[in-house]
Amino acid sequence: MLRILCKQLYFWGHKSIKMNNIILFGPPGSGKGTQAVKLAEALNLCHISTGDLLRSEKAAGTQLGLEAKSYMDKGELVPDSVVIGMIGNKLDELANKVDGFIFDGFPRTAPQAEALDNLLEEKTTKIAKVLALEVTEEEIVKRILARGETSGRADDNDEATIRNRFQVYLNQTAPLAEYYKGQNKFVSIKGEGSIDDIFAALQQAVSN
Ligand code: ADP
């Protein structure tokens, strides 16, 4: 399913409201997708999941999808240029027509984080907060194997691939926490417990 559910706003003349942009951060299987849908609905934001965008390109058999497939199936990251280009197109299409974005699964590398700041600056907006879901590796492996029974995702079935995704997260994505701590935007949230309790903690963090 393509998770881009955005109510678009149309304005007379120049657009002037401030956008509210949030990053949901955390390892694969930490619940970013589930919580992003709920937050997008509650805050009237546009949910952008790079994983969903890439899977829909794959399913449509586009050149981009074919290129992405080999990386995704192994649990490796798709090259930055591909993902950044895809996000740039989405922002061109939607910025200033929505109240803001929830980024899910993006950015995942330092170049992606810098590119996102630049792309948002071009749209005269920026990231307001980075909400990080903290979940242990053992819980992640359990959750993704359970999801694999129904998700049909090639990367959800094999424990070695799941552990590789977690290692890729530790090596390439987790260090971005420092980048956002340096910008005073990083909030850590316990990602284990009931979906509703985690959602409440996220909402609290947004309103603080
Ligand atoms: P999960 O968070 O469970 O790993 P995603 O749907 O976010 O699932 O991502 C699935 C795969 O898509 C990743 O393992 C990676 O190959 C690719 N992908 C998604 N987002 C990015 C990104 N920002 N940069 C590079 N690759 C990405």
Image (tube, rainbow, N blue to C red):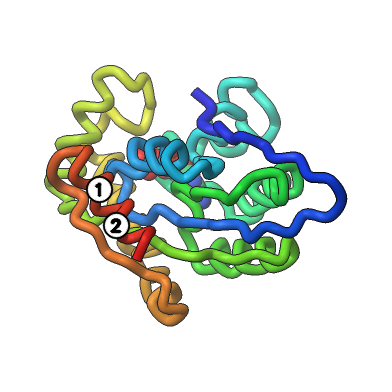
| Residue shown at the point (74%, 59%) measured from the top left | 16
* Residue behind label 2 places its C-beta within 8 angstroms of ligand 1: no
Q: How many callouts does the rendering have?
A: 2
Q: Residue furthest front?
A: 12
Residue 184 in the image: state x and y as whole percent: 41, 78
Looking at the rendering, which quadrant does residue 15 occupy?
bottom right
Quadrant placement of the C terminus: bottom left
Q: Nearer the viewer, residue 10 or 40?
A: 10
Residue 94 is left or right of residue 161, and the answer is: right
Kindly identify which numbered label has been placed on residue 173. none
Which residue is under mark 1? 200
The residue carrying pointer 2 sits among few (fewer than 14), some (14 to 19) or many (20 or more) residues within 10 Å by Cα, namely: few
| Residue shown at the point (43%, 34%) measured from the top left | 73
Looking at the rendering, which quadrant does residue 185 occupy?
bottom left
| Residues marked 1 and 2 touching at CB (< 8 Å) | yes
Which kind of residue does numbered mark 2 sit on?
Gln
Residue 157 in the image: state x and y as whole percent: 27, 28
Report whether residue 121 is seen.
yes
| Residue shown at the point (30%, 40%) measured from the top left | 161
Seen in the picture, residue 123 relative to 179 is either above or below; the reply is: above
The residue carrying pointer 1 sits among few (fewer than 14), some (14 to 19) or many (20 or more) residues within 10 Å by Cα, namely: few
- Quadrant of the rendered image holding ligand 1: top left
Kindly identify which numbered label has been placed on residue 204. 2
Mark 1 residue element: helix
Looking at the rendering, which quadrant does residue 57 occupy?
top right
Q: CA distance from mark 1 to mark 2?
A: 6 Å
Residue 25 in the image: state x and y as whole percent: 37, 56
Q: Nearer the viewer, residue 129 or 119?
A: 129
Residue 172 is left or right of residue 60, and the answer is: left
Mark 2 residue element: helix
Residue 95 in the image: state x and y as whole percent: 70, 50
